[in-house]
Amino acid sequence: HRPHPTPPPQPQSEIAAGEGLGWLSHRIQGCLCFVSRGTVIFENAQFGELVEAPRPGVELPLRTRLLNEAMAWNHEPLGTRNTTEYRLTDRQGDPLIYECRFNVVPYRSDRGVLMVLEDVTERTLLSQEASQVAQFQSVLARIGSLAVSGTPVQEIMNEAVSLTAQALHVE
């Protein structure tokens, strides 16, 4: 009776790294993926779901774009980090805005890129809407101050048209 060969034990550092990424993926807001030298070492389910959905009008799927960027980041010095925004559209033509934080971290005797991807669509659109409201309030305040200052009506109308066009980003 021959004993079955046992697989070689995984180094403790790889086990610890895997457990650490698993723990982190449950506690971090957003999607998590770790890439080293073009190989996906780890990704949580949320990352896979978010990047897999095909987007009309986009020549490269988001997954391909992110992995290409991660491979480029893999050559940067340890500790390098950056955030990139991706603007896409869903099947109905509505905007989708994702933010990916790239972090170059040590991995084995080399380095890897930890990507944290977050859907920031709602936050970004609400911020843009609030900015527009503030801009229109500013226009109304300017027109009101002109009206009570004794400025001639035609000048107030001209200023109102000009300020409104600026607020709407039209000529």
Image (cartoon, rainbow, N blue to C red):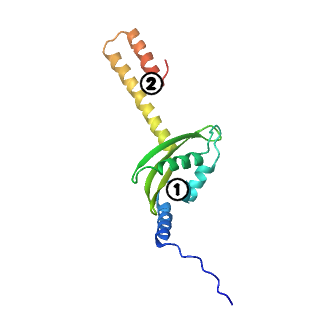
User: Relative to 90, does residue 152 appear above or below in the rendering?
Assistant: above
Residue 42 lies, with reference to residue 73, above or below; the image says: below
Q: Nearer the viewer, mark 2 or mark 1?
A: 1
Q: Residue at x 61, y 42 (%)?
A: 60
> Does 171 sit above or below residue 36?
above
Q: Distance between the Cα atoms at labels 2 and 1?
A: 44 Å
Q: Taking the image as drawn, is residue 118 in sight?
A: no
Q: Is residue 15 visible?
A: yes
SS class, disc 2: helix
> Few, some or many C-alpha atoms within 10 Å of disc 2 (few <14, some 14-19, many ≥20)?
some
Q: Camera-side residue: 36 or 44? A: 36
In which image quadrant can residue 41 be found?
bottom right
Q: Please report contact status of discs 2 and 1: CB closer than 8 Å, yes or no.
A: no
Q: Position of residue 95 (x, y in %)?
A: 57, 39
Q: Nearer the viewer, residue 121 or 20?
A: 20
Residue matched to label 2: 167
* Type of the residue with mark 1: Val
Question: Residue 101 location in percent, x, y?
Answer: 46, 49
Q: Which residue is mark 1?
A: 35
Q: Which mark is residue 145?
A: none
- The answer to which of marks 2 and 1 sits earlier in the sequence is 1
Residue 74 in percent (x, y) is at: 48, 51
Amino acid under label 2? Ala
Q: Which of the 4 image quadrants contains residue 54? A: top right
